[in-house]
Image (cartoon, rainbow, N blue to C red):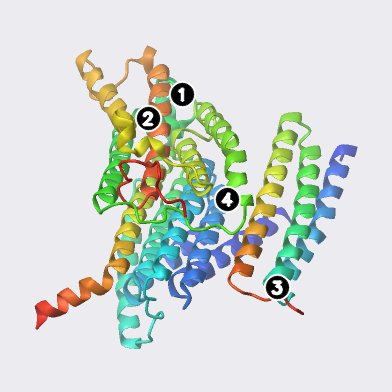
Amino acid sequence: MAPLASHAYDLLLAGALLWLAWQATHAADLFRSVISFIVFGLLMALAWIRLDAPDIALAEAAIGAGVTGALLLSALGRLTSAPAEKPAATRRWPGTIAVLALAATVLALLGAAAWQLPAPGLGDAVAGHMPRAGVDNPVTGVLLNFRAFDTLLEIGVLLLAVVAIWSLGPTPEPLVPAIPSPALPALGRMLWPMFVLATFYLLWRGTHAPGGAFQAGAVLGAGGILVILAGARPWLTGEDNGPWRWLLSLGVVTMLLAALSTTLIGQRFFEYPESAAAGVILVLEITAAISIAMLLFAAYLNGQPPARWRGYPHS
Amino acid sequence: MMLYLLLASGLFLIGCHGLFASEGMLRKLLALNVLSSAVFLAFVTIARMSDPLDPVPHAIVLTGLVVTVSTTAVALAIVIRLAAGGSDLSRGRREEDE
Amino acid sequence: MTLTEWLGTALVIAGVPFLLSGTLGLLRFPDVYTRLHALAKGDNVGLGLICVGLGIQSGSVTVALKLLLIWVLMLIASATGAGLIARTALARGLKPWGL
């Protein structure tokens, strides 16, 4: 009974995901596409749970459905005031068949490559080194100790993305759409403490259970976007607050410092001394989470924020 | 687990088709996101099939999610700029062509 | 099964018809306002019963409190979301069904 039910659940989930993916990429109505994609993100979080990846499920729910959804909806609001896009997918069968054939070929090649991966994976290797990692959650151990270099580059990518967005020009006006309901701003203000609480909870949990800097940063970033929608000004980004905006690079700078100081005390690049690993990882987690959160809502501004937020039109 | 590999393949095909065949920047961007979800799904399914559970693909997918949202944010900012100045841009290009 | 397990299962099963009727309303009602009405009411009660049921089944106070917190947050979020959608629809000029 139980395996049958779980198989039925998996089948239902897979069917819904495929249908939503099709709707997101091929629906005639853009709004429908965007909403389908947001629901797709939420259901992906369920798929991650089914695949025993709760860390990814947490991040997907906050980033895939939360932050990406807010980005897409605000972009959609700005696009519909501009001339409308062409309706979707004119049917040209030869083209469709060519694209599908190409995609199937690439898929077959990728599948063949994946098939040849070394079979047991790195599970044993990671488990063997966990006593030296300074944390108990293997995913956090991989992210901030064994493969910390990847994480450094990834926060660097996020920082570069914000630099690229800000370099495109000033933040378009109005910053947030006119909201016909007073409930959303009230909700944003009321829930902000909950977001901060959830962030610290996830950070604390990350050392021994699913959770950590990425999930915490994503939750705080999504909360920040909600507070911006509630009418708050991202004052930190204004030039009149001087060097505070350098906090955006906090995560990258701390990770680089950690990496370089390990070489100074004679260890290899990013190889923390075993006794200090737990402390170093805690500092890195907190700074990475703050940085990821601030970069996520800096990216939401869609352009360089004005020098002074005071007197900036609200909506 | 075979089901999830098939799901990843299906999402990959839908994403590829959407990326090349559907019109409109926003729809292509959504297709790109679906495509990256398909790749992440394949990663994690392969990690799930090994025993013990392999945490390295999980960490890679976590970084990948953040990279995907960065890409999406930059692309959306560009799409907004294109739509706002779109008429001017296309006019400029047409003048060049003539 | 112990008494708490029976009670938890009964509450979860009791929650399902509410979710079902909410979904039925979403699919079958004629306009956005009536659909929101069905969805917000049905799903809030259904989710509440399921959360309480799961909390009793878990047998742990912290898990039960977390589930309760999830329900309260969902109540606030769904009320806000429903209000926002309804007001936006009204501002766009959608007439309620039957008026």
Disc 1 target residue? A135
Q: Position of residue A117 (x, y in %)?
A: 34, 49
| Picture quadrant of residue C70 | top right
x%, y% of residue A282? 43, 22
Q: Dot 3 lies on which element?
A: helix
How far apart, in angstroms, are the residues tagged by discs 3 and 2? 47 Å
Crowd class of label 3 (few under 14; some 14 to 19; many from 20; radius 10 Å): few
**Tag 2: residue type?**
Leu
Q: Residue at 29%, 29% (x, y): give it.
A: A243
**Mark 3: which amino acid?**
Leu
x and y percent of residue A281 in the render?
40, 23
Disc 1 is placed on an element classified as loop
Q: Which residue is mark 4?
A: A50
Whichever of labels 1 and 2 marks the residue nearer the N terminus, that label is 1
N-terminal of the pair, mark 1 or mark 4, is 4
Which residue: 44% across, 29% down?
Answer: A127
| Residue topped by disc 3 | C27
Q: Dot 2 surroundings within 10 Å: few (below 14), some, or many (20 or more)?
A: many
Chain to which the residue tagged by mark 2 belongs: A
Q: Position of residue A5 (x, y in %)?
A: 69, 58
Mark on residue A144? 2
**Residue C18 shown left or right of residue A75 in the figure:** right
